[in-house]
Amino acid sequence: MTSPHPKKHELVRAAIRLFAENGFDGTTTLRIAKAAGVTEPLIYYHFANKDGLFTYILERAFNEYFNLLTQLPDQSKTAFHRIEALISLHMEITADKPEEMYLIASTCPAKLKDGAHACSRLMAEQRKRLSRYLNDCLKQGVESGEFVKLNIPQTVNVLMVLILGLMRQHALGLDTRRGMRKAAVDFCRRSLMA
Amino acid sequence: MTSPHPKKHELVRAAIRLFAENGFDGTTTLRIAKAAGVTEPLIYYHFANKDGLFTYILERAFNEYFNLLTQLPDQSKTAFHRIEALISLHMEITADKPEEMYLIASTCPAKLKDGAHACSRLMAEQRKRLSRYLNDCLKQGVESGEFVKLNIPQTVNVLMVLILGLMRQHALGLDTRRGMRKAAVDFCRRSLMA
Amino acid sequence: MTSPHPKKHELVRAAIRLFAENGFDGTTTLRIAKAAGVTEPLIYYHFANKDGLFTYILERAFNEYFNLLTQLPDQSKTAFHRIEALISLHMEITADKPEEMYLIASTCPAKLKDGAHACSRLMAEQRKRLSRYLNDCLKQGVESGEFVKLNIPQTVNVLMVLILGLMRQHALGLDTRRGMRKAAVDFCRRSLMA
Amino acid sequence: MTSPHPKKHELVRAAIRLFAENGFDGTTTLRIAKAAGVTEPLIYYHFANKDGLFTYILERAFNEYFNLLTQLPDQSKTAFHRIEALISLHMEITADKPEEMYLIASTCPAKLKDGAHACSRLMAEQRKRLSRYLNDCLKQGVESGEFVKLNIPQTVNVLMVLILGLMRQHALGLDTRRGMRKAAVDFCRRSLMA
DNA sequence: CATGAATGAGCGTTCATTCAT
DNA sequence: AATGAATGAACGCTCATTCAT
């Protein structure tokens, strides 16, 4: 069973790779088309414009990520188990979709000034979801006595910074050492556990 | 008493603001010149090209930052005091030079693919210096019994990710909450102290 | 029945005229486009760049010229008849393609320093072909007793200088007198014939 | 005894070399100034503009050449001796002033469309002087019976084409063979002598 | 669904030239 | 006699986008 739009799929594949390699501005529509084995106007048949193609890629990647987030363990598990699962998820998705994650990590920061841009919207959504989940974990952990007493909203933010920082470092290839997942988990466990 | 090159200075000021607001590719030399109240060719009188102006700004900002790093407390202080000083430094420089730090946080990730670019070089230098300093702190703390026993190189990296992530969040204005410095310090203290 | 690429053809026609009138550096891509009734970027759709358009014109003109050279009479004719045919050919092609020949005569000398430029390559090829043909003629004439005894390689060069000089003078419009062909032929006949 | 304007002299020396190497349009005023060890505005102190500097060089070279022409032997010598002297003069000046002659041969053809340009004026003057001298030689030779009967004005032109072609070939370095002077003289002698 | 041809708008850069000193 | 700083005018070229087919 072949894809319904094989050439559209080729366009998206080529665009992901090229946007990740050369950035949004560093990638021309002509190069995308050539890499996909089609001609330029086909981009405009399938997408509104270059930005539409970029947004399509971004949203697909974030949606996949958001789906994983909703499958995280709920309060039936221990609070720290849930935090560990969150850290693991971020390391795994970065290993699974390196090009998409590189693309997000390298191009989105430059788009944040434009609050209407998909990057802003999706990254805000990401922070909201992470906040909610971490808040829930910390509340559970503190209430159950599993964690020490701590300022929940601020610790949520510290954990979010740490997790996003790890993902970012991983995605951008800034540190290729192994064992970062375990090191981060240990660091958090020592800080949180009562 | 006026600056030795008033127009060059205006160019740099305008460029910092515009590069931060619109990214490198999103900023034209013409707009920089107009914002500085000069004509475009003056950019090429004072700098080799657009990238030279960008690099000049980057290097000036990083050098100022590196200078602060070298003034950090040495082993005469307790290990945790030194780590706290490092965290504080990163929050303070971001508050002091918000445009330069925004510029770095928003534009550099896109340049990392080019290992020869100033962004790559300076960020690598930054990581090297942070690594060295944190390594020294952790060794001191573990040896003196101030800290728990821990895997030093990996914990160095976790701390670096946390600190750079905080700075990045601060610089990009992703979280404007107060007290992040204290929250991060507390989080680390609980994790490190014996 | 129209040409397959009417606008490309217009570009080439306009470029030949303008390059001949104003030289390579004195002709802007914008003026070429306007003279051809198209927009500037079309030049870059059909040619790699300004130099590519120039080279295209040059190679087309030289190829036409080289084709004529290969149709010159062979040893079945008398040696002097062959030399006369060579002189005539150069006068005729200059009359037939005045703009192309003016273009070559006026712009190529400035390009000779760049040995890789089409001008260098094509002019070297021209000299090689003329040398070969004249050498053959002189050998034939001397061996058959039609010509006086003479130093063949050096006389080849004198004849080549004379023929190229005539063509050049004709192309650049430096002497509009009639009868130059006959005068040159007579001059050579007296010098060569036994 | 030093020159009255040592820096002006340096400018001219540098300009001759650079114009010859890179052509008029390929040489910037900045490079001339740097090569001469001065700054750009000095060019405008000593010359009206870039073209004025170019014209100055051209006129100096042509005047030197014209001076040599006036020292050629008069009718007290045989006609052929006088023609041989003319040929020799052109080979010698090209050997003596290779940069100036390369400059003229490579840049002037492109300027001929502009009849007011120094190149046009000086080259026309050159042709006029050569015509007059050769005309005089041929008349003397034919009248004295030294030369065969021939159409004088047309033969003047053939000889001029030959001489200028030799000089051009020599100046542009198109043929580095030795003995071209003698070959040309022999060729002419056979054609002219009774 | 797909393309070849074409363009409007703009960009980074160059350069001869000038002005104040 | 000489310079550092600055500019007006342009130039070659690129690129996202469109249109007719």
Image (spheres, coloured by chain):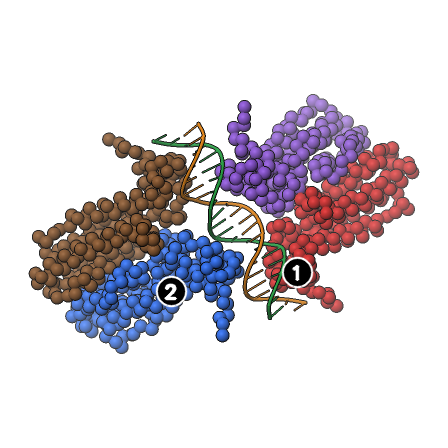
Chain colours: A brown, B blue, C purple, D red, E green, F orange
Report in which chain the residue with disc 1 lies: D
The residues tagged by marks 1 and 2 sit, at their Cα atoms, a distance apart of 43 Å
Q: Are marks 1 and 2 in contact (CB under 8 Å)?
A: no
Q: Residues within 10 Å of mark 1 (few under 14, many from 20)?
A: few
Query: Which one is nearer the viewer's eye here, D141 or A180?
Result: A180
Q: Residues within 10 Å of mark 2 (few under 14, many from 20)?
A: some
Query: Which one is nearer the viewer's eye here, B78 or F6?
Result: F6
On the rendered structure, is A153 left or right of B113?
A: left
Query: Which one is nearer the viewer's eye here, D190 or B193?
Result: B193
Q: Is residue C113 above or below residue B155?
A: above
Residue C183 visible? The answer is yes
Which residue corresponds to mark 1? Answer: D44
Callout 1 and callout 2 share a chain: no
Q: How many marks?
A: 2
Residue A103, percent from left and from top: 32, 49
What residue is drawn where x is 69% and y is 59%? D47
Residue A176, percent from left and from top: 28, 55
Which residue corresponds to mark 2? Answer: B62
Report in which chain the residue with disc 2 lies: B
Q: Residue furthest bottom?
A: B76
Amino acid type indicated by mark 2: Phe
Residue C149, percent from left and from top: 77, 32
Residue A102 visible? The answer is no
> For numbered disc 2, what is the local secondary structure?
helix
What residue is drawn where x is 50% and y is 59%? B43
Amino acid type indicated by mark 1: Tyr
Q: Quadrant of residue E21?
A: bottom right
On the rendered structure, is C42 left or right of D34?
A: left
Q: Residue furthest top?
A: C76
Q: Which quadrant: the C terminus of chain A? A: bottom left
